Image (spheres, helix red, strand yellow):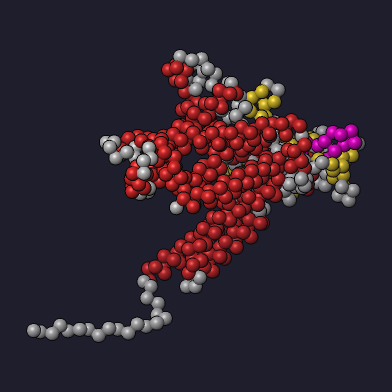
């Protein structure tokens, strides 16, 4: 029998890099892409003056290079993406919300004190008598982003002379490469990108505060997007005395409650953001109107979350028990039908149910021959919300209960049957304890989710119906929708106060969840 030739094994060379060359190329290519993205983000942040964002972006890029550009720190290569997302999407929003809750951040209080001062002075500019009007084109330097680039006024004087003005001053505009309309408005100029009406409108807030200085006391301001005038401010700021003086009325404004305030209590329109300590929290606890509304919303919030969890769990569990019977045929088909509500996006379902609950044309009233104002009456609106949430939530409970029931050994039921236990006794004493071991933590998570179920309330009732005397608090508001209204929809949005409400929500849900998880420990003894 011929012997089979055996080739000698090559000795393993420790320390030699056997990684294919193309993987190195891919790795360094991805690192280069990450660096380019970071450079682009940093450029935008610098243009916006967000230096903290620049530092954070640079730090993240350094971490990426330190971890992935070397062969060390293998565990960190897997952990870093998750850590970055955890910090940016979880930790940073929490920290920012807490910080905002101790400020007066809201309508009229979004700027720093210096920015608010400049805005008030700029808004006080009045046209100088006898001054000439200019044809105006708004532009940015060529190559700059039209949304963030430095603003430039391209001006045409009545005599046809052309000027270019920035925040630093004004100079003549070379005629070479300039195109104008018959009225004298500049439509093209070398070295500049002229903004169209839409782009100019997007930067209207900047334009209100923008002026081209022509002297120590005068500047050129825009009137709309097509003309400009030379004007002078009626307000002057004294930095040493920290006061603003209205030179036309001889009124001195001093800083008070984050506004420039006159002796008679009148204020200039633009205030500034400042730290107010625990004022927002004390307002929630001491203001009679807000406190009464807050308590009312809180009680409904707890009831809504609890009833939603209980109703969806009972219906889902009963359906799971029904379809867990081995004698039932076509279980797979029926189960597929039951999870259809779970497969449809929740916001679509909420809008469909909102139309179905319409008093005059809704399907619910037509089929039931009723005339209930589902969305206009406070109690019926609550019922409508619970019905809709039952439809949205029972498929999830059905799925988790089905999985939990299938994990219960069959011999346990057989033993209960031999011992003489009936179906209800088996369900109460055997199946339910084993079922709750699996689904108990999910019920707590479902309660926390429904406690902050913003989308359902907002899309179905928008928190209403509302009392004619108080449109800030609705009959079906949750704390989260109330916070949203305070921050964005009230007559005077107060994001600082809304942030304080969010902190209350956090501690309420945390306390309830902690209590619930402690109680679920007793279920562990069932196993």
Which contiguous range is marked in magenta?
260-270
Residue depicted at 38% across the width and 37% down the height? 423
| Magenta span: chief secondary structure | loop
**Which residue occupies the foreground of this view, 78 or 1?**
1
Name the side, left or right, on which 372 lies relative to 281: left
Identify which residue is drawn at 50% across, 26% down: 354
Queried whether the magenta region covers residue 267, the answer comes back as: yes
Residue 450 percent across, percent down from the top left: 54, 38
Q: Is residue 181 visible?
A: no
- What percent of the width, then of the height, locates residue 86? 55, 55
Q: Quadrant of residue 201?
A: top right
Farthest-out residue, left: 1
Residue 154: x %, y % from top left: 66, 43
What residue is shown at x 87% (from left), y 42% (from top)? 254
Q: Is residue 362 left or right of residue 319?
A: right
Is 114 drawn above or below residue 232 in the view shown?
below
Depth order, front residue of 397/385 = 397
Is residue 6 shown left or right of residue 201? left
Give the camera-side residue of 181 and 268.
268
- Residue 373 forms part of the magenta stretch: no
The total number of labels drawn is 0
Q: Nearer the viewer, residue 261 or 147?
A: 261
Whether residue 101 is visible, yes or no, is: yes
Q: Residue at x 84, y 43 (%)?
A: 255
Quadrant in which the N terminus appears: bottom left
Pick out the residue farthest to the front.
419
Q: Is residue 506 left or right of residue 5?
A: right
Q: Position of residue 266 (x, y in %)?
A: 84, 33
């Amino acid at each position: 029998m011929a012997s089979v030739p055996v080739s000698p094994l090559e000795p393993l060379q420790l320390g030699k890099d056997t990684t294919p060359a193309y993987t190195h190329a891919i790795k360094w290519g991805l690192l280069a892409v990450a660096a380019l993205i970071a450079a682009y983000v940093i450029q935008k942040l610098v243009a916006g003056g967000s230096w903290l964002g620049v530092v954070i972006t640079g730090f993240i890029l350094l971490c990426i290079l330190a971890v992935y550009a070397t062969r060390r720190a293998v565990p960190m290569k897997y952990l870093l993406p998750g850590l970055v997302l955890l910090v940016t999407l979880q930790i940073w929003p929490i920290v920012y919300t807490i910080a905002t809750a101790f400020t007066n951040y809201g309508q009229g209080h979004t700027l720093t004190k210096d920015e608010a001062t400049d805005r008030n002075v700029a808004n006080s500019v009045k046209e100088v008598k006898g001054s000439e009007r200019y044809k105006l084109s708004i532009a940015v330097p060529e190559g700059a982003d039209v949304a963030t680039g430095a603003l430039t006024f391209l001006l045409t004087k009545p005599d046809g002379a052309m000027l270019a003005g920035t925040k630093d001053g004004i100079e003549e505009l070379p005629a070479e490469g300039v195109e104008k309309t018959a009225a004298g408005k500049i439509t093209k100029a070398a070295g500049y990108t002229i903004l169209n009406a839409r782009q100019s409108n997007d930067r209207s807030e900047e334009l209100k505060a923008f002026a081209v200085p022509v002297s120590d006391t005068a500047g050129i301001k825009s009137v709309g997007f097509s003309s400009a005038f030379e004007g002078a401010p009626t307000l002057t700021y004294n930095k040493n005395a920290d006061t603003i003086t209205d030179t036309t009325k001889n009124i001195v404004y001093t800083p008070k409650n984050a506004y420039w305030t006159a002796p008679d209590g009148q204020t200039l329109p633009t205030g500034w953001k400042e730290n107010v300590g625990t004022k927002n929290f004390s307002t929630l606890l001491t203001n009679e109107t807000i406190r009464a509304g807050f308590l009312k919303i809180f009680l409904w919030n707890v009831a809504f979350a609890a009833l939603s969890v209980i109703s969806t769990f009972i219906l889902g569990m009963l359906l799971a028990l029904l379809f867990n019977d081995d004698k039932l045929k076509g279980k797979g088909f029926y189960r597929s039908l039951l999870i259809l509500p779970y497969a449809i996006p929740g916001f679509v379902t909420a809008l469909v149910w909102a139309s179905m609950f319409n008093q005059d044309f809704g399907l619910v009233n037509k089929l039931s021959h009723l005339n209930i104002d589902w969305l206009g009456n406070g109690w019926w609106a609550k019922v409508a919300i619970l019905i809709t949430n039952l439809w949205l939530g029972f498929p999830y409970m059905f799925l988790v209960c089905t999985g939990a029931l299938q994990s219960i050994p069959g011999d346990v039921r057989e033993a209960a049957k031999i011992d003489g236990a009936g179906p209800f006794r088996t369900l109460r004493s055997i199946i339910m304890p084993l079922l709750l071991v699996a689904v108990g933590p999910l019920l707590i998570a479902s309660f926390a989710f429904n406690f902050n179920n913003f989308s359902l309330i907002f899309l179905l009732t928008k928190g209403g119906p509302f009392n004619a005397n108080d449109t800030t608090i609705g009959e079906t508001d949750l704390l989260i929708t109330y916070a949203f209204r305070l921050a964005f929809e009230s007559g005077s949005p107060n994001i600082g106060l809304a942030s304080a409400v969010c902190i209350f929500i956090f501690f309420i849900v945390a306390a309830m969840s902690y209590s619930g998880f402690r109680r679920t420990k007793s279920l562990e003894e069932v196993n």
